[in-house]
Image: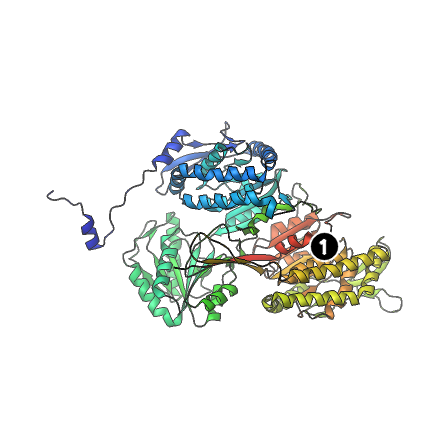
């Protein structure tokens, strides 16, 4: 037709211009929303409910149009939901493993029928999730539901699990929490974010359609993160699993502190991840990967490009070529544009040069893909990236420098390394402190691999068999749970600062004065920095048995400095070498048996026979840990993609332990063995009530071949030292036996950076059975974090 402006496919190929894009209709999703009158209620007890007189909030699409409205739940809805979930747990956990597996696997075919609707709802609301990934999750966890009682013995479901997510969390991240919890026999309450709410409600409806018991899966929607804290207040909630951005996760931790419910945090949004290109890489493939990861996929993480200096010019030249003609990327709002402009201006002021696909428009919520060349690791736009398509580029000279750059970020979520040298790839993978690492690839995932958030990127393990244990408890465990109660009114700034009853012992008559013990820091017995002591009283609270140093913040700081120096070398030792050291420690305890039996007898009032038995059990426990060193390891796992994938257990780093009162020696060696057998260094705070057996154990440590600083023992007031452990940024995990107030303080405080917490509120005569051998598996899992390494093949 004359004057037609319609271009043929041939014309488009000749000019290499973008062709017209079809506007998606989302017909299936729109029909489902229309069926619900575009007003989505709560999903409680197997059905949609919309209580009267409830506020609602609108959900908008990427263009600002209204998709639907959702109900904001109130406390009455939370109570009704919790009651339904408790009933649903009884019905769901009462089924056999085979029945639960059959139901979960039947969802695969149902999702095949309704996958288009799920996909369209995700696209419409900005929470893209391919149905194929959900199918893979259902297949994997359906099979684990079948095998729970066969391969995971002596573990039972927790009860009611609350899965809370932030507004920007993907549907995949939600189901990575929900499906393993269901597979293990728990009931689940989902508190979804804004963008994932419609898809989550649809999936809940599909679950009910295949026969899931009413109440086994419930969905509560609200206006903000406070709803998650309201759900946690319910006495029926056993565990809270959070996924999303860190800010909301920190708010949830602080809001639930003292409620007596464990909270795990997986900050999967907003982490800074290194993309490392070595000179031995296929540069073309690496640059293609950079473009796809940084500019073409939804940015749940911020990438930082690290390039070896010898190939910098080649990489930048290919980036310029590949970015030509790329369109501007839509930002979330005009406010993001101001942040992007400020970051670019700051980068240029610091000497960075720009590589852009096109000139930036003068205004509007759009910005072109931009590489900021010449960034420094300390630059604000690297440390705290702004939203938008900005990619900082840094350079390095040697392989160790690349590892240092990769570990510079406080986050430890993921990394991508590009090299054709497999030895270099594996060495770098082992040295980077991240949960997921991809070799010559990026952003690949599969539920079969366990992944832990290293450093400030999480406090739990998701995926694989290891990720199932956060939703289980040992059936034979006698460990008391945290007390379910309302949080105590506390001034966190003054906790642990009460006046110390520290004294300077009178040694004018050494023959009659109680013995003054020393603490153990950096491989040496020493006094506390303060020079003062605390009196250790007899079991009845009468006479003074001895004096121990009154340690404080500076003593903990010195212990951490000593531990940090030695822990990397200890972690790199072979498991058999660590085992030999533990066997030697057991022999050393045998040599000092008589002295320690006497100390237990004097401190606790136990008979000599019972004290002898505790020492005998302690010697056997150290031997058990020595034998355990090289028995449980990771390995290669089958994955649906081509290539290989490795799961690797790694040490946490420096662990702080506040020891329990009960069985003072046996509990100490059990905890100590778990920590050092897996490659950690440890700072231990002896029981304030029964410290003498631990102080006597220092003699065994002094004569052992453990590296100086690997094990440190700091004595003093429990609350004061707990504060010192909580506020030290290097300590990765804290295992605490103490008061309910101490548990609440740690839950509130250990959020920046995130610390892994194992909390036990002990009473005078309560506590776990330290003689039980099942403790070894539980404590081993608490002492390691997991890393997945992907190695693709053609």
Going 37% across and 62% down the picture, which residue do you hit? 286
* Residue that sits furthest to the left in the current view: 2
Q: Is residue 428 above or below residue 63?
A: below
Exactly how many numbered labels are in the figure? Answer: 1
Q: Quadrant of residue 144?
A: top right
The picture places residue 207, in percent across and down from the top left corner, at: 49, 35
Q: Quadrant of the N terminus?
A: top left
Which residue is pictured at 71% across the width and 68% down the height?
A: 584
Q: Is residue 702 above or below residue 59?
A: below
Q: Position of residue 33 (x, y in %)?
A: 40, 33
The residue nearer to you, when weighing 394 against 720, is 394
Placement of the C terminus among the 4 image quadrants:
bottom left
Q: Nearer the viewer, residue 307 or 137?
A: 137
Q: Measuring 73% from the left and 56% from the top, which residue is drawn there?
A: 667
Q: Is residue 382 visible?
A: yes
Could you say whether the residue bearing mark 1 is in a helix, strand or loop? loop
- Residue neighbourhood size for the residue with mark 1, other residues' Cα within 10 Å, grouped as few (<14), some (14–19), many (≥20): few
Q: Which residue is mark 1?
A: 498
Residue 83 in percent (x, y) is at 60, 33
In the picture provided, is 99 more to the left or to the right than 329?
right
Q: Is residue 685 visible?
A: no
Instruction: Name the residue at the top extreme.
Output: 52
Question: Which residue is more in the foreground, 355 or 433?
Answer: 433
Q: Quadrant of residue 359?
A: bottom left
Left or right of 646, for residue 32? left
User: Which is more toward the observer, 135 or 760?
Assistant: 135
Instruction: Tell me: residue 416, above or below residue 743.
Output: below
């Amino acid at each position: 037709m004359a004057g037609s402006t319609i271009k043929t496919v041939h014309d488009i190929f000749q000019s290499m211009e973008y062709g017209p894009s079809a506007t998606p209709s989302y017909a299936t999703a729109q029909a489902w929303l229309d069926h619900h009158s575009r007003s989505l209620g709560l999903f409680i007890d197997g059905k949609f409910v919309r209580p009267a007189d409830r506020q609602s909030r609108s959900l908008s699409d990427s263009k600002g149009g209204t998709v639907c409205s959702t109900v904001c739940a109130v406390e009455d809805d939370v109570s009704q939901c919790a009651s339904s979930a408790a009933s649903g747990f009884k019905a769901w956990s009462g089924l056999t493993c085979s029945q639960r597996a059959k139901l979960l696997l039947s969802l695969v075919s149902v999702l095949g029928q309704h996958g288009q609707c799920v996909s369209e709802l995700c696209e419409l609301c900005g929470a893209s999730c391919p149905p194929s990934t959900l199918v893979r999750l259902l297949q994997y966890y359906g099979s684990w539901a079948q095998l729970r009682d066969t391969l995971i013995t002596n573990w039972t479901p927790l009860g009611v699990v609350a899965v809370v997510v932030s507004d920007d969390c993907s549907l995949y991240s939600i189901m990575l929490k929900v499906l393993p919890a269901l597979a293990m026999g728990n009931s689940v309450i989902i508190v979804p974010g804004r963008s994932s709410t419609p898809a989550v409600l649809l999936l809940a409806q599909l679950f009910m359609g295949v026969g899931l018991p009413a109440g086994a899966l419930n969905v509560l929607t609200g206006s903000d993160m406070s709803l998650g804290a309201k759900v946690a207040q319910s006495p029926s909630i056993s565990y809270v699993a959070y996924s999303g951005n860190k800010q909301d996760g920190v708010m949830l931790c602080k809001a639930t502190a003292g409620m007596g419910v464990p909270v795990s945090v997986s900050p999967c949004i907003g982490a800074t991840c290194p993309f490392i290109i070595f000179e031995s890489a296929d540069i073309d493939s690496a640059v293609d990967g950079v473009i796809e990861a940084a500019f073409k996929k939804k940015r749940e993480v911020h990438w930082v490009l690290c390039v070896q200096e010898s190939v910098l010019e080649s990489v930048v030249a290919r980036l310029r070529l590949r970015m030509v003609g790329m369109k501007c990327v839509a930002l979330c709002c005009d406010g993001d544009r101001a942040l992007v402009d400020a970051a670019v201006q700051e980068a240029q002021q610091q000497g960075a040069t720009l590589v852009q696909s096109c000139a930036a428009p003068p205004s509007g919520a759009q910005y072109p893909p931009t590489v900021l060349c010449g960034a420094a690791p300390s630059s604000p736009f690297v440390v705290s990236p702004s939203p938008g398509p900005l990619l900082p580029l840094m350079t390095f000279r040697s392989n160790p420098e690349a590892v240092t750059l990769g570990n510079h970020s406080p986050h430890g979520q993921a990394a991508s390394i590009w090299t054709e040298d497999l030895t270099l790839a594996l060495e770098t993978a082992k040295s980077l402190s991240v949960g997921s690492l991809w070799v010559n690839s990026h952003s690949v995932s599969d539920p079969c691999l366990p992944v832990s958030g290293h450093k400030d990127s999480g406090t739990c393990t998701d995926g694989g068999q290891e990720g199932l244990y956060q939703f289980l408890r040992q059936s034979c465990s006698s460990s008391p749970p945290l007390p379910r109660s309302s949080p105590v009114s506390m001034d966190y700034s003054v906790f642990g600062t009460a006046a110390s009853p520290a004294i300077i012992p009178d040694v004018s008559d050494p023959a009659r004065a109680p013995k003054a013990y020393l603490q153990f820091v950096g491989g040496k017995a020493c006094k506390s920095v303060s020079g003062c002591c605390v009196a250790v009283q007899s079991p009845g609270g009468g006479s003074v048995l001895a004096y121990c140093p009154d340690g404080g913040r500076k003593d903990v700081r010195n212990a951490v400095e000593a531990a940090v120096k030695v822990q990397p070398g200890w972690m790199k030792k072979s498991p058999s070498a660590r085992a030999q050291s533990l066997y030697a420690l057991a022999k050393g305890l045998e040599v000092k048996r008589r002295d320690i039996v006497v100390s237990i007898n004097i401190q606790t009032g136990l008979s000599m026979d019972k004290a002898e038995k505790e020492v005998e059990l302690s010697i056997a426990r150290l031997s058990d840990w020595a034998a355990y060193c090289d028995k449980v390891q990771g390995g290669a796992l089958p994955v649906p993609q081509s290539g290989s994938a490795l799961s690797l257990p790694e040490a946490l780093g420096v662990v702080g332990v506040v020891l329990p009162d009960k069985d003072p020696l046996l509990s100490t060696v059990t905890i100590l063995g778990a920590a050092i057998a897996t490659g950690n260094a440890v700072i231990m705070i002896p029981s304030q009530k029964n410290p003498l057996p631990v102080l006597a154990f220092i003699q065994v440590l002094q004569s052992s071949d453990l590296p100086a600083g690997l094990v440190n023992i700091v004595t003093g007031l429990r609350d004061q030292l707990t504060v010192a452990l909580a506020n030290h940024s290097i300590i990765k995990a804290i295992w605490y036996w103490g008061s309910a107030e101490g548990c609440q303080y740690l839950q509130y405080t250990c959020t920046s950076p995130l610390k892994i917490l194992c909390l036990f509120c002990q009473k005078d005569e309560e506590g776990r059975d330290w003689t039980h051998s099942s403790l070894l598996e539980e404590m081993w899992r608490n002492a390691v974090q997991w890393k997945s390494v992907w190695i693709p093949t053609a």
